[in-house]
Amino acid sequence: MKKLIIVLLTSLTINSFGQHALFIPDTLSGTSFNLRVHRDSIQFAAGKITQTLAINNQPILGLTLFLKKGDSVSLNVINEIGDTTTMHWHGLHVAPKNDGGPKTMIMDGMNWNPQFVVRNNAATYWYHPHFMQKTASQAIKGDAGLIIVRDDAEAALTLPRRYGIDDFPLVVQSVELDTQNQFMPRGMVDSIVLVNGTTTPTVSIPAQVVRMRLLNGSGERSFNFGFTANKSFYVIGNDGGLLNAPVSTTRIRLSPGERAELLINLTGMMGQNIHLMSYASEIPMGVQGGPTMPMPPGSPLMNSPLNGIDFNILAISVGAQTSAAITTIPTTLVSDVPYAASSAIATRFINMTADSMMVMDGPFYFNHNLFNMNRVDYKIPLNNTEIWTLYDSTMVAHPFHLHDTHFYILDRNGVAPPATEQGRKDVLLIQPNETVRFIAKFEDFADTSTPYMYHCHILMHEDDGMMGQFIVGTTFEGVKEQHLTNSRILVYPNPTNGTLHIHLSETNTALTTLYKVYDASGHEILNELMNGSELELNTTNWLKGVYSLLVINNEYIKSLNFVVK
């Protein structure tokens, strides 16, 4: 097994301490996997050794797992870290008992043996711990790794897939070390960029079409990936699978937890050198990685030297072509048809909030609630197709991650997403004052005792409680469920077949309030601005079904569902 000797990056210049060969994680394949999670260490810098969490003697980051769609697999996770942990298979569609959420605890010295059929399409997924309040401290220390799923559709395409030769795994992380060279879980002054656990990395890549599997494994930083001199590349896949066709671009922004598969054509470039970069100067304020935001007095430091500037991530030297080199970009990939908005039979609304607009470091909430292990936020009937609407009313962008299933982004502020976001996703970045809608189907697994999670994938936000949970079952009457954030809104009768009364309690009667109503297809059917605390809607001629009410004023943003029968 290879051993890493890593030197602390103390400058943004790629040649500060010389370059280091990019470490390529070892692999495991087949249907039975043993993952021994244990303590290890690395000499990051002069002085104290940095303590890490390791897997199978690989001192930082786990081995890459190769799975094949349709296989029945067994994974044995052996916990030897001296603390309780979990292991979440991020992006894999598995039963909740196998998902590795906070309730599926692996005590120190114990083994956990999830077994499942691989149902996912070919794509790049990953695994990491998900133990409540310790996700950041465990994952950032290196307890994470990639999962590559193969399937017949991907195998039929002319794509690079020789691991470490023309198909490169790239786990990009930004971290902060304290004065004792130990990882800082909150890492808000992160200045060290790792690629596969390597600082100032360099790699030789053949002069042909090369595939790069990018994972943003950081605790909070977003990267705006591109190449030297704005060299174009192709995005062929994101979180949950291949796109229908390659998308030519010069940038791909990934927030924590997001993945993308790229093709870059280096044909004819032998002997040249380029860099994979982050063009962070183009990231807007409010997204971690963009310009440092002004902080209220007494707030924790968030002034990383990486914020808002362009910097190199990976030095690439272009070498000779390999045998059987691929030198062309395919024109089409797969046929993946998103769910039609009209197929949704339920809607849900999540408002991302904070104690005030001045809060930059949390805690942050979903619908004004922190995570409660004993509270189920949503009960979702099996086979429901649903539209979820997310609104960020904080000053900070949040990468929203949904367990269990993938989703398709319908729109951002009413506008269709860019082509690179039109495939299957499990993480999306929502920016301040942005509204994003996605559609998802909850199928295959019903379990009313073990929940799935949804959460912000900024790890310190998640650990602080920006997380909720839902269960999928076969006996719920989903159309009768309503989500009421607190007692400020009273809607009656619910269900209704005539006049619906909306009453805002504890509200200034002179306050101007915006009322919006969406049908099950996500179409806005009411948009009314008025003063007062009472509104009556005549629903006599409305179609039967579930409707979503959104109430917005200067005091709060609230939502709930009601039913017209």
Image (tube, helix red, strand yellow):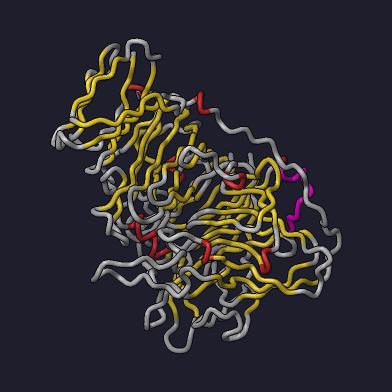
Q: Does any portion of residue 524 appear in the rendered image?
A: yes
Is residue 162 on the magenta stretch?
A: yes
Where's residue 440, x and y in %? 49, 34
From the viewer's perspective, tell me whether residue 165 is left or right of residue 4. Answer: right
From the viewer's perspective, tell me whether residue 346 is left or right of residue 424. Answer: left
Where's residue 157, x and y in %? 77, 45
Which of these two is toward me, 488 or 460? 488
Where's residue 237, x and y in %? 64, 48
Above or below 369: residue 443? above
Which of these two is toward me, 458 or 342? 342
The image quarter containing residue 27 is bottom right
Q: Does any portion of residue 407 appear in the rendered image?
A: no
Image: magenta residue range:
154-163
Position of the C terminus, as image quadrant, is top left
- Residue at 33%, 67% (x, y): give it: 294
From the viewer's perspective, tell me whether residue 28 is left or right of residue 452. Answer: right
Position of the N terminus, as image quadrant, is bottom right
Where's residue 172, x and y in %? 55, 65
- Residue at 68%, 68% (x, y): give it: 229
- Residue at 26%, 45% (x, y): give it: 368
Above or below 217: residue 67? above
